[in-house]
């Protein structure tokens, strides 16, 4: 039986029952948007607390996400979004979106525990004709090597005959979840062309941008490649910063003039690369490659450069202490910025975390300030009074408005390390100051 023809009809008439597994920063907004567009949605999450919050119309996602809380309350009040922790409730689903975490482990290998668990539970209850779409970012080859076998073995159904598969990688960014879901193009990788086109019909209900049908491996590649591309771009800027320091040059001046050359767009050097995507996706991409003839060099090297940057900030700090003739051991350092990204409360894989850990191995104490992270919202200048130096690790707008004179006068020693080009070096010319700006020799 060709289930796809019937499914296409049901999607067109918005009669298709859509299930979303994983109600995090991707799954929840997606579920709300499909509900708002007129579909009946059932969302599943294994966290009972999260389900209770959503049932009460309360947005469980932290951080400022414009429009999400209002949208959630609206669709819950309209009974368009049902939520559960019980897979049995997903039996009748015609389409199932999977939005679970796909981390890599300490050896940078993808660990698909959540994905495998979701597929195993789903397989036991899914009905014939269901279309399952993985939205999580996965390594190329994962649908074929991980998802397909689990679904077939646990359901007894046959892919492309009794059920269908697709992958439509998410392109969301914290702080702009709804906007990105609406406005960013997406690739619709289907197990066959008809499936890919049905995915385009489905996502057209919530996406205003391009929807590009393609095969599954292409879709798996696109997401991991686009973030690996960014990782390499940032690593390039970081390595040029190190070279500029070594040549007593100013990387920001060099970057400005390089970018005047057609087709150049050098990104910003900085104190490191954090977040939930960029540090992880290159490893997902690399895990899909295996040719003894040639070992990948560029992608691992870019990761190594970016992972080094917080340690380079430590090097600059050590040089400053040496110049001042004081020891880092038993000192206290003020870290300005713990979020991985400017003007964000997200601390996942934060470069500051790496710097703080290394400072502790150097027997230095640390005080952390970050106006965006609830645990670290102390009074900056008060904190500075007990510290021997300040290190800027995130380009929060609050730090751009900071009086450097107040900061320096509050510190026990006039030592400032700028990892994000926040301070104009001209302001720090005063002889007694020890100021080091990443990328400026
Ligand atoms: N960073 C630099 N220099 C730069 C840009 C970023 O050091 O020039 C650092 C940031 O400080 C941060 C990390 O890299 O620690 C990541 O920053 P990001 O701007 O890439 O922000 P992310 O991690 O939120 O990346 C997301 C990605 N979007 C999705 O996965 C859907 C990425 O593909 C986007 O390109 C990026 O947002 C974006 O452009 O804002």
Image (cartoon, rainbow, N blue to C red):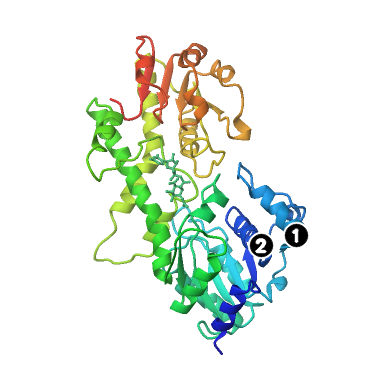
Mark 1 crowdedness (10 Å alpha carbons): few <14, some 14-19, many ≥20: few
Q: Position of residue 308 (x, y in %)?
A: 37, 39
Q: Earlier in the sequence, mark 1 or mark 2?
A: 2
Which image quadrant for residue 95?
Answer: bottom right
The residue under label 2 is 35
Image point 36% across, 37% down: which residue? Answer: 268
Q: Is residue 48 visible?
A: no
Image point 56% across, 21% down: which residue? Answer: 380
Q: Position of residue 201 (x, y in %)?
A: 52, 70
Does dot 2 land on a helix, a strand or a loop?
Answer: helix
Q: Is residue 189 visible?
A: yes
Tell which of 233 and 338 is nearer to you. Answer: 233
Q: Residue furthest bottom?
A: 1
Marker count (numbered): 2
Tell which of 281 and 426 is nearer to you. Answer: 426
Ligand 1 is located in which of the four quadrants? top left
Q: Position of residue 57 (x, y in %)?
A: 74, 52
Q: Is residue 22 above or below residue 302?
A: below
The residue under label 1 is 78
Image point 27% across, 66% down: which residue? Answer: 292
């Amino acid at each position: 039986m060709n289930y796809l023809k019937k499914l296409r009809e049901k999607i067109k008439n918005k009669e298709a029952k859509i299930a979303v597994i994983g109600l995090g920063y991707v799954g929840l907004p997606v579920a709300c948007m499909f509900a708002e567009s007129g579909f009946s949605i059932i969302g599943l999450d294994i966290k009972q607390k999260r389900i209770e919050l959503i049932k009460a119309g309360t947005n469980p996602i932290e951080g400022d996400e414009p429009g999400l809380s209002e949208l959630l309350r609206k669709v819950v009040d309209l009974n368009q979004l049902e939520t559960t922790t019980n897979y049995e409730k997903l039996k009748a689903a015609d389409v199932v979106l999977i939005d679970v975490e796909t981390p890599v482990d300490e050896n940078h290998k993808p660990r698909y525990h959540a994905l495998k668990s979701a597929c195993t539970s789903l397989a036991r209850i899914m009905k014939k004709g269901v279309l399952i779409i993985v939205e999580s970012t996965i390594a190329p080859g994962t649908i074929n090597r991980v998802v397909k076998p689990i679904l077939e073995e646990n359901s007894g159904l046959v892919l492309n005959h009794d059920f269908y598969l697709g992958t439509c990688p998410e392109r969301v960014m914290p702080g702009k979840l709804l906007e990105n879901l609406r406005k960013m193009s997406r690739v619709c990788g289907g197990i066959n062309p008809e499936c890919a086109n049905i995915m385009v019909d489905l996502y057209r209900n919530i996406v205003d941008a391009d929807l590009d049908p393609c095969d599954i491996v292409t879709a798996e590649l696109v997401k991991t490649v686009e973030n690996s591309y960014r990782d390499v771009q940032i690593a390039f800027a970081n390595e040029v910063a190190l070279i500029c320091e070594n040549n007593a040059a100013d990387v920001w001046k060099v970057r400005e003039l390089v970018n005047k050359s057609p087709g150049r767009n050098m990104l910003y050097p900085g104190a490191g690369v954090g977040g939930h995507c960029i540090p992880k996706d290159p490893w997902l991409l690399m895990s899909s490659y295996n040719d003894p003839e040639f070992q990948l060099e560029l992608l691992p090297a870019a990761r190594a450069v970016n992972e080094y940057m917080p340690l380079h900030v430590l090097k600059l700090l050590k040089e400053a202490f040496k110049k001042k003739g004081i020891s880092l051991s038993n000192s206290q350092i003020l870290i300005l910025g713990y979020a991985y990204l400017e003007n964000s409360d997200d601390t996942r894989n934060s470069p500051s975390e790496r710097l703080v850990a290394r400072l502790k191995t150097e027997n230095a104490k640390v005080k952390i300030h970050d106006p965006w992270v609830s645990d670290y919202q102390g009074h900056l200048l008060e904190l500075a009074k007990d510290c021997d130096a300040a290190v800027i690790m995130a380009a929060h707008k609050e730090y751009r408005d900071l009086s450097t004179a107040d900061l320096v006068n509050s510190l026990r020693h006039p030592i400032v390390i700028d990892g994000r080009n926040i301070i104009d070096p001209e302001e720090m010319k005063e002889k007694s100051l020890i100021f080091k700006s990443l990328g400026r020799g």
